[in-house]
Image: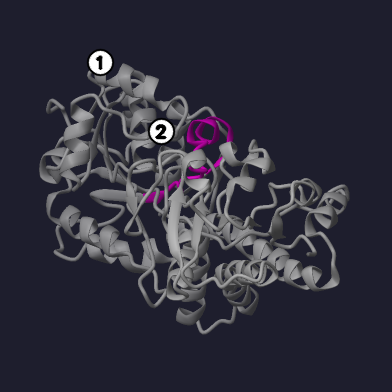
Amino acid sequence: MEKAKKIDMNNINEVKNSLENKSLKVCVVGIGRIGLPTALSFAKAGLQTVGMDINEQLVDSLNKGNFPLKDEPGYEEIFNDVIKNGKFSATTDINKAISQSDLILLSLPTPINEKNIPDYSALESVCKQLGDILQPNSLIVVESTIEPGFIENNLISILEENNRLHVGKNFTIGVCPENANPGEILHDFTTLPRLVGGIDQQSTKIITMIYDFVFSVELIIMPDCKTANAVKLTTNVFRDVNIGFVNELSLMFDKLGIDTLKVLDAAKRKYNFQIHYPGPGVGGPCLPINSYQFLNTATRTNSKLSIIEHGRKINEEMPEHVVNLTLDGFKISKKSIKDSSILILGISYKPDVKDIQLSPAEMIINKLESLGVKIKIYDPYFKGNQVFGINVEHNIDDVLSKVDAAIIVTAHKEFQEINPKIFRKMKTPILIDSRGIIDTVSANNVGLVFRGLGRGI
């Protein structure tokens, strides 16, 4: 990125002109699952964009023209175009990237630690660096998912720590929380509304203008940063809580001999029922973490969020339930689970995405191994890789005859299209379906010892 006259990012007319002549220079810090598509979106809009990341291997690969997110339809073509026309490049040099940029987007991970406390160290570390190197009159937009008040109570003070920067005077900040589902990011970036909140009306207007230039979606104006972040968390935690609700019902329905899927199929016909499905647990970088972010806020504000807390507990206990279903299958088959061999079908936390963050598969595997089970894995997105210390099989057909049982953990499209007859190749054969993709009647008709989560058997 070539040096150019610095744009005053708190001057709405200067920003407008910089968009019109495409002189606005952008730096996206953190170019992972969300950050890279974000950077490519700005570059596609004609704005010179640099992606900054500490992952040297990723940066080197990107600059060589290798696109890593093969499970994100549509972005490889965009990547190739912006690399070819020179609108996008990647770097590990934060000093150089920031010094040459007007707009700084932060798309950094906000995970939880082993005590389920949100870990904002990546954001805090970058903001400490920005406190030393940010150019005057720059605009920072935080896209990372954070707790309400984190901008106002934490990040601004970090940025102002050395008394060089002063918010509203020589830099400004706001939020536009990412709103995309892994595996469907291009669709979501081009259809779903975005939330915009700044530290004041001027910054909100400017951020709105920029995002309106890049994204052809509705922009919902929030009164401040904390309200925008509260909305983002509310939408995701709503899903986590409702999955917990359905999971809890499914445990009871099993005892009643009721198929949860039939209940949900009928219930969704009521106009105000929003369907959520039971499963082996909730993983990924969003839902479980977002619930703990709200719970952390509750602790900080001396509030009580008992529904969220209970929903989290239920979802975290579901891998144990899957193991219990497996034990039941072995009991019916009059076979000891110890020294048996079980195939795990799917290790991604969600279908058709190469991502194992907080995947319930890991907890299921760990519990089974503690029972003396030999684990094999097949996942079409990890063929030939080693995951959780286990080599992932290349082909499902080759491994079925070598195992006693199989557990469907992830509803990949490949598994949804599978014929239950294939599981007859197994030694026993025991099939556990934690995702509701195998028809109970079909499984029974081909002679499987079948257990489905929430299927009433």
- Is 322 displayed left or right of 171 in the figure? right
**At label 1, which amino acid type do we have?**
Lys
Residue 148 visible within the image:
no
Magenta extent: 174-194
Tags 1 and 2 touching, CB below 8 Å: no
Q: Is residue 70 above or below residue 404?
A: above
Q: Is residue 150 above or below residue 384?
A: below
Q: Residues within 10 Å of mark 1 (few under 14, many from 20)?
A: few
Q: Residue at x 61, y 58 (%)?
A: 428
Residue 67 visible within the image:
yes
Rendered location of residue 69, percent (x, y) = 37, 35
Rendered location of residue 344, percent (x, y) = 50, 54
**At label 2, which amino acid type do we have?**
Ile
Q: Is residue 226 above or below residue 169?
A: below
The numbered disc on residue 84 is: 1
Considering every residue shown, the one lying at the far bottom of the view is: 302
Given residues 212 and 238, the one toward you in this image is: 238
The numbered disc on residue 210 is: 2
Q: Is residue 186 magenta?
A: yes
